[in-house]
Amino acid sequence: MRLQLTNFDAVTFDVYGTLIDWEPSIMAFLRLWADQHGVCAPDEDLLLAFDHTRAEIQKERPAPLYPEVLRRCFDRISVDFSVAVDKREQVEFATAPHQWPAYADSHRALTALQARVPLRPRRHRRARRRLQAGLAALPRCD
């Protein structure tokens, strides 16, 4: 059975992990952070710490913007690995999504979807402007 987009009033999806390839960027940041602070943990443990912490934070308070989730993740991961929270690193981690790469097919997929239905975030005007700017900045994959 083929889905018909016209049968839906709205389609929602998570940007990070759906359009944005977050895992390599998170891992690279955490690996560098761990090495700089003498944290002896394999990449898998760092990534699991992040994912577990992120899930806890989003369960406690499901609505914050992702940079706030990342800021809180950084604080908790620092504490979990007995590293003092460095505010500069915290800000760098929380603002990093603006530099994370999109998946190669994100632009093509969003363009195809937008040809069929209007795309617009409904949560915040600021989020809408960021999505529009982000869509314009995505690499073309023609």
Image (tube, helix red, strand yellow):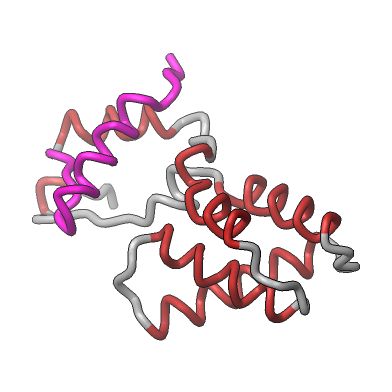
Residue 138: image location, x then y, percent: 40, 27
Q: How many marks?
A: 0
In the rendered image, the vertical position of residue 29 relative to residue 64, given as above or below: above
Residue 95: image location, x then y, percent: 48, 49
- Is 130 a magenta residue? yes
Q: Nearer the viewer, residue 127 or 55?
A: 127
Look at 72% across and 47% down and name the residue there.
Answer: 28
Q: Quadrant of the C terminus?
A: top left
In the rendered image, the vertical position of residue 47 relative to residue 19, given as above or below: below
- Is 70 a magenta residue? no
Residue farthest along the top direction in this orientation? 142
Residue 101: image location, x then y, percent: 53, 35
Look at 59% across and 72% down and name the residue there.
Answer: 75
Q: Is residue 62 left or right of residue 99?
A: left
Start and end of the magenta stretch?
Answer: 118-142
Q: Nearer the viewer, residue 91 or 80?
A: 91
Q: Quadrant of residue 43?
A: bottom right
Q: Quadrant of residue 50?
A: bottom right
Look at 55% across and 44% down and name the residue there.
Answer: 21
Q: Nearer the viewer, residue 82 or 126?
A: 82
Q: Nearer the viewer, residue 10 or 91?
A: 91
Look at 34% across and 34% down and name the residue there.
Answer: 134
